[in-house]
Amino acid sequence: MNFEICTDTVEGAIAAEKFGVKRIELCAALSVGGLTPNYGLIEQCVRKSSVEVHVMIRHKEGGFQYSHEDVEIMKTDMKQAKKAGARGVVFGILTSGNKISSLNEDLVIVAKSLDLEVTFHRAFDFVIDYKLAINKLIELKVDRLLTSGLQVTVAEGLPIITELQAVYGNQIQIMAGSGVNSSNALKIANSGIQDLHFTARKETKISSKFEMGNQFVIDEDKIKSIVNLF
């Protein structure tokens, strides 16, 4: 089983290495689904750990529809991620009708030219036709799909995840994420999934003034409880 931890800190990368995790999905702003992290954070995660660093390429919150100008920003961010030592990038663009946008092709081409792996993130869970969508991703030569089976959590979306793995798993890597924990990880794995994605952080008691955000720390107990099942 391969594990990927979603994190926004160097400490998350260090903990991932400690427990034998294969990859981290490195983000900023996890409270809004994850945005592109800064160069310094990417570089330090690469330097301080041996895990693969896969960088979220999403520079603004509020959905997955982007303009050509947005795509140029995303290309620049991918180049910076590579320069900082990243092994892969994570992105996803949808049309206004929630189909896989043709704009993804430009990003895949740039990523591959930089020798970066490509993960299409949970924008997939918003598509109107998941069979058409995954075939498009395969056509684009996307390496990996992160999905909760079009539902809020993997537990609810497991039937579709199981179908995706059975039908398309030999053409694109299927990674299950959203709500993965020690009580359901084995059940998900029994569907044939070989890659599990989860966030492992917990809120501290420290509060901030003026809506500056809450502080979180790495939840090593969660990582250990899942990894030790396998």
Image (cartoon, rainbow, N blue to C red):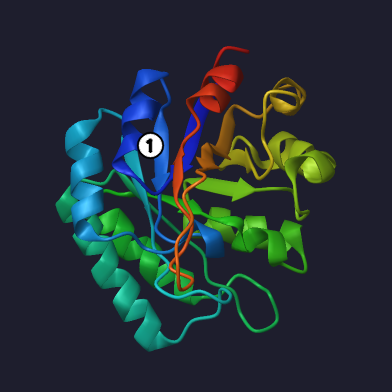
Q: Is residue 111 visible?
A: yes
| 164 horizontally vs 19: left or right | right
Q: Residues within 10 Å of mark 1 (few under 14, many from 20)?
A: many
**Residue 98 in the image: above or below residue 87:** below
**Residue 120 in the image: above or below residue 225:** below
Q: Position of residue 47 (x, y in %)?
A: 17, 36
**Residue 1 in the image: above or below residue 146:** above
Residue in front for this viewpoint, 21 or 119:
21
How many labels, in total? Answer: 1
| 82 horizontally vs 222: left or right | left
Which residue appears at 22% of the width and 39% of the height? Answer: 46
Q: Is residue 33 visible?
A: no
Q: Which residue is mark 1?
A: 12
Quadrant housing the N terminus: top right
Which residue appears at 67% of the width and 42% of the height? Answer: 168
Residue in front for this viewpoint, 213 or 113:
213
| Residue 83 picture quarter | bottom left
Which residue appears at 49% of the width and 71% of the height? Answer: 211
| Residue 81 picture quarter | bottom left
Q: Position of residue 56 (x, y in %)?
A: 40, 57
Which residue appears at 70% of the width and 66% of the height? Answer: 126
Residue in front for this viewpoint, 52 or 166:
52
Residue type at mark 1?
Answer: Gly
**Residue 26 in the image: above or below residue 94:** above
Q: Position of residue 167 (x, y in %)?
A: 73, 39
| Label 1 SS | helix
Quadrant housing the C terminus: top right
